[in-house]
Image: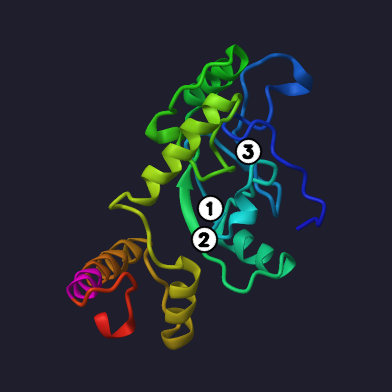
Amino acid sequence: MESGTQPPSSPGSSGRSGPSGSGLPPTYWRKCTTCKKLIGFGKRYWICSVSTCNRQRTGLVFCDIRCFDAHVPVLNHRDAGAFERVAPTQADALAALASASLGVASVMPQSAQLSPGAGTLAPSSGASLVTRKSVAAQASDEDEILVVVSKVKGYIRVRSGMNTSDSVMDVLSQFVRKYSDRAIENAKKRGRQTVFDQDF
């Protein structure tokens, strides 16, 4: 990956508006940070769990888990995970772009909601507030993946040589959620504000 990665243009919109600025509808959403492959509208992509990779001026996105893995040593991440996302549809991206040009702060539909900095739109201070609320709501979502995908897949591959289905992460996250909730209750019963290992 190039060390001088350029910040994305309008994180919630597409990477370009058409050939040579012709004003035509955008033909793709963004480019992969590592290999520069085009990421189409509504296509799967991955983001990094490290917050510095998801800032407004950074917004790194990856077309493939291998491209994510390639950026880890370059940025000296000690513990980074890959989270799968879906790019907005072309209609959603155009609507977001239109809203930005009008200074309208609107909450994007589910298909267009992305990670902080990688797919949120903040054309004004009002939109920034909406973005922060959306991120907080996403963090509490029961469908949120709570494990480091690349670490789990790497462990299983090293131990067995097997591949791992993405659906496994949902199951593992449910286990984490279940036992974490149980530990929280145990800590409360013991009058503590901190969860310790013995609470599990």
> Quadrant location of the C terminus?
bottom left
Q: Residues within 10 Å of mark 3 (few under 14, many from 20)?
A: many
Relative depth, front residue between 110 and 62? 110
Which SS does the magenta portion mostly show? Answer: helix
Residue 54 in percent (x, y) is at 60, 49
Q: Earlier in the sequence, mark 2 or mark 3?
A: 3
Q: Secondary structure at mark 3?
A: strand
Residue 76 in percent (x, y) is at 71, 70
Q: Earlier in the sequence, mark 1 or mark 2?
A: 1
| Separation of marks 3 and 1 at Cα, in angstroms | 12 Å
Mark 3 highlights which residue? 30
**Residue at x 38%, y 63% (from the top left corner):** 146
Please tell me how many numbered marks the rendered image carries.
Answer: 3
Relative depth, front residue between 146 and 46? 146
The amino acid pointed to by label 3 is Arg
Whether 94 is drawn above or below 162: the answer is: above
> Quadrant location of the N terminus?
bottom right
Mark 1 highlights which residue? 46
Whether 27 is drawn above or below 148: the answer is: above
Residue 160 horizontal side relative to residue 94, left or right: left
Q: Secondary structure at mark 2?
A: strand
- The residue mark sitting in front, 2 or 3, is 2
The amino acid pointed to by label 1 is Trp
Q: Is residue 185 magenta?
A: yes
Q: Secondary structure at mark 1?
A: strand
Q: Which mark is residue 82?
A: 2
Residue 150 in percent (x, y) is at 50, 69
- Magenta part of the protein: which range? 182-189
Residue 86 horizontal side relative to residue 98, left or right: left
The amino acid pointed to by label 2 is Ala
Q: Residues within 10 Å of mark 2 (few under 14, many from 20)?
A: many
Q: Which mark is residue 7?
A: none
